[in-house]
Image (cartoon, coloured by chain):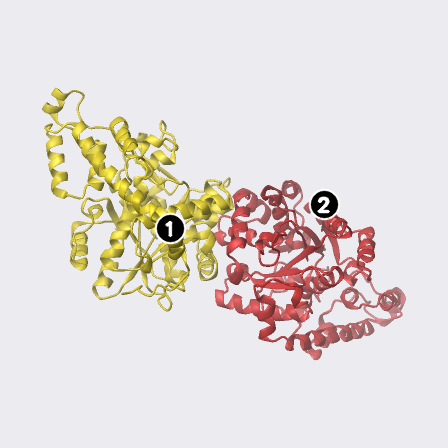
Chain colours: A red, B yellow
Amino acid sequence: MEVDKKEEIDSESSEQVVNPWEVSAKDGGKIDYDKLIDKFGCQRLDESLIDRVQRLTSRQPHVFLRRGVFFAHRDFNEILDAYEKGDKFYLYTGRGPSSEALHLGHLIPFMFTKYLQEAFKVPLVIQLTDDEKCMWKNLSVEESQRLARENAKDIIACGFDVTKTFIFSDFDYVGGSFYKNMVKVSKCVTLNKAMGIFGFSGEDHIGKLSFPPVQAVPSFPSSFPHLFPGKDNLRCLIPCAIDQDPYFRMTRDVAPRLGYSKPALIESSFFPALQASTLLSSLQLLKGENGKMSASDPNSAIYVTDTAKDIKNKINRYAFSGGQDSVEKHRELGANLEVDIPVKYLSFFLEDDAELEHIKKEYGEGRMLTGEVKKRLTEVLTEMVERHRRARAAVTDEMVDAFMAVRPLPNMFE
Amino acid sequence: MEVDKKEEIDSESSEQVVNPWEVSAKDGGKIDYDKLIDKFGCQRLDESLIDRVQRLTSRQPHVFLRRGVFFAHRDFNEILDAYEKGDKFYLYTGRGPSSEALHLGHLIPFMFTKYLQEAFKVPLVIQLTDDEKCMWKNLSVEESQRLARENAKDIIACGFDVTKTFIFSDFDYVGGSFYKNMVKVSKCVTLNKAMGIFGFSGEDHIGKLSFPPVQAVPSFPSSFPHLFPGKDNLRCLIPCAIDQDPYFRMTRDVAPRLGYSKPALIESSFFPALQASTLLSSLQLLKGENGKMSASDPNSAIYVTDTAKDIKNKINRYAFSGGQDSVEKHRELGANLEVDIPVKYLSFFLEDDAELEHIKKEYGEGRMLTGEVKKRLTEVLTEMVERHRRARAAVTDEMVDAFMAVRPLPNMFE
């Protein structure tokens, strides 16, 4: 049903395209997230839900919730209803390991997932889709497996609890119950439907057609018999960027026909690129879909491997400013916060609400200059990247093996 | 290239269709195997090759070779060239476990494969495509796995050497190196090409599109790292019915792009149905593609579960006779051997060449009556089915486990 709704709306309005491989707005402009919610048929994550999260977890909701980075959901309310009655769930997120160095946008779902794992005290599975990247990016099997392991180190560096977390690569793990679920899902999706949802064409290889079930089945606990024995009805909550929604629309469409629960979703907007005058997201830039800036432009994003000097330089030279052309004009008119990247970035990563409000007020009213805001952002990001780098350096191969070992998780539901 | 040739010929002449799901001749008539060889681009298995097999194996070639049941090949000569120089190969065949009871036609590839294994002293992998049958026949995962195990017992009853044979079910075995090869193959086949080769449509589910790589990859020794460690260039010979050719045309097309050897093939014609007045094959009848007789008509074939009484009754009542309407006319004109099913069946299963020639001569010239030929066929098939039943009854679950265990085969290349 959800799928049909999406297809129907697609045909009547094609001004913006959001799917796992393409994010583009009309005339290269800004993504309209309200329209996207309507088009995909998901729900807005409203204040009352966020209040409920606060009440149920007895802690302040994550910055990404308070500030609307995660802005949409599917059935998250049902997950909370069940949790309130004492029923746990599990988290599922993932990454396509197409590059060695992650940028800040890549960390967002993992930072948020770590918060969810801690706040709700639930198990987590993280899928590394090395098979997908081998097929889409034409990487060798060995190279995509190597990247999966390198990316696993960055993910582990985000601070996940090894006693509650299973990280797996598709090349390692596909088989057994997981493969059986892939076949079950494949039986329920016609070629026409897959082409409608994902926009595949006859020139695409059949690997692309075969992949959506691989991303679908971690939504079903029976795909992990060692993790969830006897808990085939455990619900699944998927934190992800909204471009992944098509995979899970398909999954939710199929689930009831297999006797499985639909996975719930909590979905984020895109993280903007440094140069994003029109708030093109870094996702857009890195996907190379939007004109000027190429997928390989290292100046479109801050990477976790950037040095303090790189970060300072990138922010000063490339971060698009909403400040005015001259100090005089700036004092008079103030900054346009709607397009200002330093303020956008601070709203993701500056945890202190009061300080953020202060900066927005002072900068918006012209009393604070772009240079000062960029300086503060440089401090925040440098500290964050340094902290990540230290944490990553401490991740040993043995730790990767421990997270990726196929094993029961004894503290799973403590 | 082979694929392109096939597609081109397809478009200019569509009088007969032969693919893994459909076998139909023009006007319900006889399959023209010469045209099929041209259309598919394979080679005829000629006398000189059969003589070579005799010389290399120091034994009389199998009845199915001597009498043209296996009539076509791809690169079988190269397999023999290498064998002559001391290079071994491995055999790969399989079965889609869609039904509990096998009929005689199902046994043909296994009887022939057993002969090849013994004559060339080579290892063998047998794929049970329970995933395929789950998807095509809409069986549950559990039911198709159960059928795979039941069929394995019939296969083992054919007399394979457990020290040289690995039987696997896809649901059990897909994963690891096998899955990596599936992904590599999938990358090389466009949707358009798959639709051209297999005739899929948009209404088919994506499981069907995902399956051809599953049947392709047992052609590559690296899919079985436990069996063929360090022998990634071992050549593969596939004995199969010619309706499976599309899978292996695709496989051969892809293999060089992956740095793998193309599998060689040795291909059989179809086994005729009992009532086949126009030599419709039992495959056609069982696939339900040809009008009158339904897929579930138990009288179209002799099953390995039939009793002696069943066999006698089926042959007497249903086996299409080329004899004349009256004894007088028969004595005068003789039987039409071209359409006579008892003689066809005897040419598959009566091993004594002299006796077969005698029957054909006497029957063809009217001195022997249909009843006498049917009586001899009843004896031959009853003995064969009884022998199979005894052998199958002796197959224990432990033996199935032994054949299906993932293990090195110590005597693999002795």
The residue wearing badge 1 is B396
Looking at the image, residue B223 sits to the left or right of residue A300; the answer is: left
Q: Is residue A162 above or below residue B114?
A: below
Vertical placement of B298 versus A307: above or below?
above
Residue A69 sits in which quadrant?
bottom right
Where residue B115 appears, as percent x and y from the top left, is: 24, 52
From this viewpoint, is residue A297 visible? yes
Q: Nearer the viewer, residue A114 or B384?
A: B384
A397 or A204, which is in the foreground? A397
Circle 2 residue: A38
- What percent of the width, then of the height, locates residue B35? 27, 41
Q: CA distance from mark 2 to mark 1?
A: 60 Å
Q: Chain of mark 1?
A: B
The chain ID associated with circle 2 is: A
Q: Residue at x 32, y 37 (%)?
A: B303
Q: Is there CB contact under 8 Å for labels 2 and 1?
A: no
